[in-house]
Image: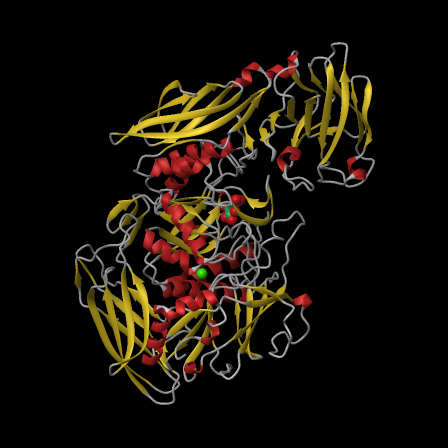
């Protein structure tokens, strides 16, 4: 079977492809001597180092008992999300038997890894072929001397994701999943080929020394490697093609490469007239096909994207793309998904970029590390301006090893992604002085600044065509370090109305900074707030994680950003909720600031941006708050929001108009009087002469009858919380309130809140909020039989006997001697259920009686029996 890659034979799915054109193409390519490249993702064996005997790289080792995995793979997809603190940071081994077709003999063979986190050592047939440090950039090794054709070549990869003080990132708000989590490729080339080992870059670098709307030139540079035994005289032919394939320029030059040597080349095209420019509105791509010829024999070919565009950043006027003013409104993206961790197939990477584009954004910050080639390709094709950065986050180690790794990561990123027209900003640090102490450690600070200057200089040396950026936190803005003026553009990560301040502070803060540094181009590289679809309130505050707070945050913040055209760009933190194993908010190990949930379901707030940024008709009823409840007449009046880009919107509830509201800041709002049951909401508006309609449903449980012995049989209280909480069974736990006759409420105590993870429950927010020092809860219910379930959580005491209390129902003891630390331990959800009988028209009075410390209660469920 000449030309068929035998290593793919065992896999039926790929076989089908091979008998079709791909296999044919490979055969042809090999006959002509061109490069062949295919993934080797399937059928690896994986084992954690602890389970592996010595000699894991030895071909003779029996790995039959190892887990069979396909790449991309991480060993942290699950343990980074469970409620056990931490996740496995250790060593894992991967092994693969690579069957190489004999027709590949005589060619140069390379293994190309798109990424492995974070140190990889690669062995072929027991020989160490290379080692790579850094979890987010690609690397390639020449394996020609190590492979065998008469028997399978055993590839063994040792991957280590342990903390290493010399390797960035040291500390950051995301999970450092270990493994070979991106694609692996086998590459076979002619002995004479474009360099494959140039920091795993494409070996051919394309840019545009001249580019205007009328004219452009294309420059193609690279290195030709001759691994053969004879001198090579080769012609480098670079064909510039339009999207449709039509050739618009051919660049030719010749190079002489000695045996075992290398030779650089550089070509510049004649002037092309009227290039079609690349922009988010029209992401038009050309391609450069660079080939190496000896006579008519083509020995190598590399195809790279090309976009004609140029960017200017003015500190007063903002950004100009291709000479036209453009507002860069965008978002940030992390690369993980539930169930997969960071080990995403290309299709999932592409889908994320599509979601960002669909949301109306034209700017994408790839925070905090270089991302998969599929991401860059999608950004080129869909039209997103990209900021890409290396993972130097929060802190540095003052060692030359750390600096050198950071610098090499920067070079790898720039070379690997140099040809992507979407990339316009290279970043090299995020909040790097975040952890500064007072008094300032001036020696540390000086080294941070020196490293910034070193990375800045290297970025400019590698790529003078793009702008450099760094991002700093609020606390770093005025630290006097001089750091702020090192990059071309300063990114600000601002959390007014979340970590500090109020929403309204944002604009004033920016204006003051801008006035003080009028020559400094500014971006807002992050702004965002966390949310949980189960948490709702009409009175949102920071850190309640209500959907309503997140929505208010973005409405208020974006309106201010939009009104400041001097900003070079803005980016939401974050497009998607993402894994952060050390973080504890209302969902364990997740950063919840996404406009989308972790599983890529849009949150309501995503539609605000869609309405603000897209021209197509957008009209969307916010629906995360789709289960509601109220136990007092005034609770029936609750708001509905619609996000739209129409002038006004009419809302109908069960067919009854609630009136037209003007759309201001893409938002319209109504107060609706809810009745018990499921309601159909319809919103309508007009855009471009046509109707725009949306439908949603809201269930409202009217519990006012509970106090008259009718209606819903359940009353649920989220003690210590101003927000409502909907649990996994759909029960709505109402916000806590002081007692008022005729209803229910607390007597005494203080509302408390923690964000610690709570074990033995999925309803963390219900238990994270609690009432401490409570004297009683009163429920003015009629006589009858009730079941009471009380929820508790000990947030303070590790040791027994610090907090001991009892609960009485009326005069009868319900619970006695409750010591949570002794019984179930700290940070654990505990519930107690008991039946009570209410007689004598007194209602139900739950009295909390302290033995030691102050009584606490997190939730109260009352069921009428
Ligand atoms: C930041 C960091 C980012 C965090 C974010 C947050 O400023 O740059 O990595 O995830 O804040 O959510 O706190
Ligand atoms: Ca990939």
x then y, percent, for residue 657: 38, 18
Q: Residue at x 44, y 59 (%)?
A: 372
Q: Is residue 773 above or below residue 581?
A: above
Q: Is residue 273 visible?
A: yes
Quadrant including the N terminus? bottom left
Q: Is residue 520 visible?
A: no
Q: Quadrant of residue 399?
A: bottom right
Classify residue 471 as left or right of residue 341.
left
What residue occupies the far bottom of the structure in this picture?
230
x then y, percent, for residue 144: 47, 81
Q: Residue at x 24, y 29 (%)?
A: 689
Quadrant including the C terminus? top right
Please name whichever residue, 23 or 839, is drawn nearer the observer in this view of the structure: 23
Please name whichever residue, 644 or 96, is drawn nearer the observer in this view of the structure: 96
Please name whichever residue, 597 or 367, is drawn nearer the observer in this view of the structure: 597
x then y, percent, for residue 307: 28, 58
């Amino acid at each position: 079977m000449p030309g068929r890659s035998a290593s793919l034979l065992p896999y039926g799915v790929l076989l089908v492809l091979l008998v079709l054109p791909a296999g044919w193409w490979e055969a042809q390519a090999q006959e002509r001597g061109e490069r062949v490249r295919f993934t080797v993702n399937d059928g690896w064996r994986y084992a954690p180092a602890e389970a592996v005997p010595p000699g894991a790289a030895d071909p003779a080792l029996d790995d039959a008992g190892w887990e069979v995995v396909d790449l991309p793979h991480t060993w942290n997809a699950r343990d980074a999300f469970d409620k056990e603190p931490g996740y496995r940071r250790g060593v894992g081994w991967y092994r693969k038997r690579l069957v190489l077709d004999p027709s590949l003999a005589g060619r140069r063979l390379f293994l190309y890894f798109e990424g492995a986190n974070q140190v990889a050592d690669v062995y072929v047939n027991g020989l160490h072929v290379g080692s790579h440090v850094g979890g987010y950039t690609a690397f390639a090794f020449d394996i020609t001397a190590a492979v065998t054709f008469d028997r399978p070549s055993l590839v063994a990869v040792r991957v280590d994701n342990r903390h290493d003080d010399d390797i960035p990132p040291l500390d950051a708000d995301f999970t450092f999943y270990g493994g070979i989590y991106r694609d692996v490729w086998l590459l076979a080339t002619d002995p004479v080929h474009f360099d494959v080992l140039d920091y795993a870059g494409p070996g051919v670098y394309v840019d545009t020394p001249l580019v205007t709307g009328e004219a452009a030139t294309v420059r193609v540079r690279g290195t030709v490697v001759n691994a053969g035994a004879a001198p090579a005289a080769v012609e480098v032919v670079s064909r510039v093609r339009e999207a449709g394939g039509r050739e618009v320029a051919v660049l030719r030059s010749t190079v002489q490469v000695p045996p075992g040597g290398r030779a650089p080349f550089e070509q510049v095209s004649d002037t092309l007239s009227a290039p079609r420019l690349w922009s988010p509105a029209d992401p038009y791509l050309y391609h450069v096909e660079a080939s190496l010829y000896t006579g008519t024999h083509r020995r190598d070919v590399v195809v790279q994207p090309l976009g004609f565009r140029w960017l200017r950043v003015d500190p007063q006027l903002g950004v100009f793309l291709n000479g036209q003013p453009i507002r860069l409104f965008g978002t940030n993206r992390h690369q993980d998904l539930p169930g997969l961790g960071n080990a995403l197939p290309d299709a999932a990477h592409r889908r994320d970029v599509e979601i960002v584009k669909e949301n109306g954004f034209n700017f994408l910050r790839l925070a905090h590390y270089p991302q998969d080639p599929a991401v860059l390709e999608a950004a080129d094709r869909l039209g997103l301006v990209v900021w890409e950065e290396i993972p130097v986050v929060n802190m540095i180690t003052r060692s030359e090893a750390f600096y050198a790794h950071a610098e090499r990561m920067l070079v790898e990123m720039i070379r690997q992604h140099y040809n992507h027209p979407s990339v316009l900003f290279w970043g090299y640090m995020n909040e790097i002085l975040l952890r500064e102490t007072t008094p300032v450690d001036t020696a540390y600070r000086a080294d941070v600044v020196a490293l910034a200057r070193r990375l800045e200089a290297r970025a400019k040396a590698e790529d003078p065509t793009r702008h450099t950026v760094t991002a700093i936190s609020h606390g770093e803005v005025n630290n006097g370090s001089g750091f702020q003026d090192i990059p071309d553009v300063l990114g600000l990560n601002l959390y007014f109305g979340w970590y500090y301040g109020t929403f309204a502070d944002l604009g004033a803060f920016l204006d003051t900074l801008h006035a003080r540094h009028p020559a400094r181009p500014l971006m807002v590289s992050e702004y965002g707030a966390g949310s949980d679809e189960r948490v709702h309130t009409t009175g949102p505050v920071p850190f309640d994680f209500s959907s309503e707070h997140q929505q208010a945050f973005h409405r208020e913040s974006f309106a201010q950003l939009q009104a400041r055209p001097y900003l070079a760009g803005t980016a939401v933190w974050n497009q998607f909720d993402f894994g952060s194993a050390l973080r504890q908010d209302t969902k364990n190990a997740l950063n919840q600031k996404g406009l989308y949930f972790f599983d890529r379901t849009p949150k309501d707030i995503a539609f605000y941006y869609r309405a603000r940024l897209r021209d197509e008709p957008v009209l969307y009823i916010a629906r995360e708050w789709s289960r509601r409840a109220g136990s007092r007449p005034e609770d029936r009046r609750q708001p509905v929001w619609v996000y739209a880009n129409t002038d006004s919107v009419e809302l109908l509830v069960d067919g009854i108009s609630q009136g037209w509201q003007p759309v201001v800041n893409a938002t319209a709002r109504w107060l609706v009087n809810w009745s018990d049951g499921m309601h159909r909401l319809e919103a309508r508006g007009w855009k471009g002469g046509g109707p725009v309609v949306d439908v949603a449903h809201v269930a409202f449980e009217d519990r006012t009858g509970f106090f008259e012995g009718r209606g819903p049989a359940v009353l649920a209280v989220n003690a210590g919380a101003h927000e409502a909480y909907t649990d996994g069974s759909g029960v709505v736990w109402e916000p806590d309130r002081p007692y008022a006759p005729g209803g229910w409420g607390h007597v005494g105590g203080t509302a408390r809140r923690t964000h610690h993870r709570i074990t033995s429950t999925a309803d963390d927010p219900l238990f994270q909020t609690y009432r401490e020092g409570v004297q009683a809860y009163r429920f003015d219910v009629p006589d009858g039989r009730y079941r009471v379930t009380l929820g508790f959580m000990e947030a303070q005491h590790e040791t027994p006997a610090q907090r001991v209390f009892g609960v009485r129902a009326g005069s009868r003891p319900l619970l006695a001697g409750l010591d949570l630390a002794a019984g179930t331990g700290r940070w654990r959800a505990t519930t107690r259920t008991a039946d009570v009988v209410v007689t004598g028209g007194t209602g139900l009075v739950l009295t909390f009686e302290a033995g030691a410390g102050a009584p606490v209660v997190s939730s109260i469920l009352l069921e009428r029996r």
